[in-house]
């Protein structure tokens, strides 16, 4: 669990689990959580221009749950 401050500066706890859809604050690109290691979250990001997936590590405080969209690409982790 991570203590994250919202826009109105009220702290709340946010947990990320593998398979969750998240996005970086300020961007609407959905990414899938691959693994969580302390404050570091590894995500898979799909690049439609190059038609490939990219692995990226972000801090948990910079992530938020992704907005629900119809037809959004979701990776299933097994």
Image (spheres, rainbow, N blue to C red):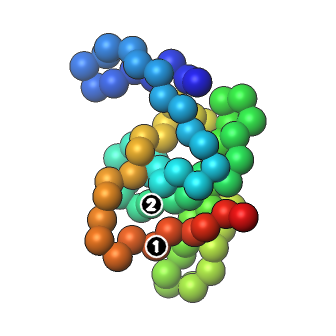
Q: State the residue at coordinates (52%, 59%).
A: 31
Q: Where is residue 25 in the image (x, y as percent from the top left)?
A: 40, 43
Q: Where is residue 58 in the image (x, y as percent from the top left)?
A: 61, 43
Kindly report which numbered mark, 2 or 1, lies closer to the viewer in this rendering.
1
Rounded to the nearest angstrom, the CA distance separating label 2 from label 1 is 8 Å
Whether residue 14 is situated above or below residue 30 in the rendered picture: above
Q: Nearer the viewer, residue 46 or 1?
A: 1
Which quadrant holds the C terminus?
bottom right
Residue 53 location, quadrant: bottom right
Q: Is residue 57 visible?
A: no
Q: Name the residue under label 2.
A: 30
Q: Are marks 2 and 1 in contact (CB under 8 Å)?
A: yes
Q: State the residue at coordinates (32%, 54%).
A: 67
Direction left: furthest residue? 8
Q: Name the residue under label 1.
A: 73
For label 1, count other residues whose C-alpha is less than 10 Å away and answer few (under 14), some (14-19) or many (20+): few
Specify which label sits upstream in the sequence, 2 or 1. 2
Residue 38 location, quadrant: top right
Horizontal side of 36 relative to 23 (left or right) equals right
């Amino acid at each position: 669990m991570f203590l994250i401050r919202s826009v109105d500066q009220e702290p709340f706890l946010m947990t990320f689990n593998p398979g969750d859809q998240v996005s970086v604050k300020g961007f609407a690109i959905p990414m899938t959580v691959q693994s969580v290691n302390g404050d570091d979250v590894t995500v898979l990001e799909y690049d439609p221009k190059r038609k490939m997936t990219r692995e990226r590590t972000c801090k948990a405080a910079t992530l938020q749950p992704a907005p629900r969209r119809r037809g959004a690409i979701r990776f299933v982790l097994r």
